[in-house]
């Protein structure tokens, strides 16, 4: 089969590799679509831990090709989405139900071969079936949607509250829509790129503003108390902005994935004096089924977030090129 193989820092090549041999508890998935995530770019740049050679890609949808001998009730041809995260089940955190913090956490496409290939082997428990009429390209968004749902579970967005999203990429716009349907009275998206601001408005998010005009906009609209600020970029300047704009007694959700070694200075006194709650959000425990249901319900506008579709052969070029202002979500289709 063909696969995009990460060989070393800043080196991905298309190669012919053997089709994975599945074990008795595994499923062989024929990949239909796989999203390109910021984590993939971090791996490519050497900014995230991953051991080459590795087939990246963890936002996977496709059809069941073959099942292991211990599996029943899952037929070849069934449409599926994949939760890439594999916990050990027996460490301290797993015993506490904190499976995303597993001390032995593995992930398809990060620590083991993933979806930038024609076929991928996945444990049965990480397979989620889809309705036959579900668009498999759209279903590649199940994993990032699940991550967003976990983030929303970690913060208290009460009905009538005010939410500020820093970053209008695909993740930021998913989070903004979730905040809206959760019951937030006001959802403001801060995004510098005009194309992304336009898409945000088109999918029903009217309060979209350039970061340079954010303070003036909030003053004009008399939005002087932001209950929840969500940092959805992974930059140090937007993290500092999040601490600035959160109200006294407010909360900050750190969702964007920053480079592993990035650091910044903050004022402990400001956190103390404002009595801020700062919450991280890591992957997607126990919410993938909910993500499938929500995606299939059509309650979120996700189609417009997929702005680029490429073939597997284009992965080396696309992953080595910084995303442009028109790029929200890139998916590889097969």
Image (spheres, rainbow, N blue to C red):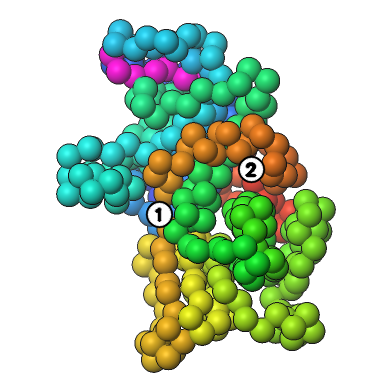
Where is residue 277? Give x, y as percent: 42, 74
Q: Residues within 10 Å of mark 1 (few under 14, many from 20)?
A: some
Task: Check disc 2 and report its element: helix, strand or loop.
Answer: strand
87 or 251, which is in the foreground? 251
Quarter of the rendering containing residue 195: bottom right
The answer to whether one can see residue 288 in this image is yes
Q: Check if mark 2's residue and mark 1's residue have beta carbons within 8 Å.
A: no
Which span of residues is magenta-colored? 24-31
**Is residue 222 found left or right of 279 in the rendered image?**
right
Disc on res. 282: 1
**76 vs 210: above or below:** above
Q: Residue at x 23, y 49 (%)?
A: 96
Q: What separation in Å lies between label 2 and label 1 (alpha carbons)?
A: 22 Å
Indicate yes or no whether the magenta region holds residue 193. no
Disc on res. 330: 2
Quarter of the rendering containing residue 318: top right
Where is residue 30? Give x, y as percent: 51, 18
97 or 54, which is in the foreground? 97
N-terminal-most mark, 2 or 1: 1
Where is residue 202? Give x, y as percent: 82, 53
Q: Residue at x 22, y 37 (%)?
A: 89
Q: Characterize the magenta stretch by its predominant secondary structure.
A: strand
């Amino acid at each position: 089969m063909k696969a995009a193989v990460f060989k070393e820092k800043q080196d991905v090549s298309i190669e012919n590799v053997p089709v994975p041999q599945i074990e008795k508890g595994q499923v062989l998935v024929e990949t239909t679509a796989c999203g390109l995530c910021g984590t993939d770019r971090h791996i490519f740049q050497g900014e995230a831990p991953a051991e080459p050679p590795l087939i990246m890609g963890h936002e996977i949808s496709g059809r069941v090709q073959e099942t292991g001998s211990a599996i029943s009730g899952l037929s070849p041809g069934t449409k599926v989405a994949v939760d890439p995260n594999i916990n050990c089940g027996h460490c301290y955190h797993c015993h506490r139900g904190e499976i995303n913090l597993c001390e032995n956490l593995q992930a398809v496409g990060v620590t083991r071969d993933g979806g930038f290939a024609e076929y991928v082997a996945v444990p049965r428990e990480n397979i989620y079936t889809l309705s036959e009429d579900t668009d498999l390209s759209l279903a590649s968004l199940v994993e990032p949607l699940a991550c967003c749902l976990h983030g929303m579970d970690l913060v208290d967005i009460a009905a009538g509250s005010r939410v500020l999203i820093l970053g209008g990429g695909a993740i930021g716009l998913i989070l903004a829509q979730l905040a809206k349907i959760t019951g937030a009275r006001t959802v403001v998206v801060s995004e510098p790129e005009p194309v992304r601001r336009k898409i945000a408005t088109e999918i029903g998010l009217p309060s979209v503003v350039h970061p340079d005009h954010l303070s003036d906009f909030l003053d004009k609209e008399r939005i002087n108390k932001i209950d929840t600020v969500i940092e959805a970029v992974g930059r140090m300047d937007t993290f500092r902005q999040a601490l600035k704009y959160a109200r006294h007694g407010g909360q900050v959700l750190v969702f964007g994935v920053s480079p592993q070694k990035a650091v910044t200075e903050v004022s402990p006194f400001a956190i103390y004096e404002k009595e801020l709650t700062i919450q991280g959000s890591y992957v997607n425990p126990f919410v993938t089924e909910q993500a499938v249901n929500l995606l299939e319900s059509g309650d979120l506008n996700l189609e417009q977030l997929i702005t680029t579709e490429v073939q597997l052969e284009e992965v080396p070029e696309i992953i080595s090129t910084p995303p442009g202002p028109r790029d929200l979500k890139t998916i590889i289709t097969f």
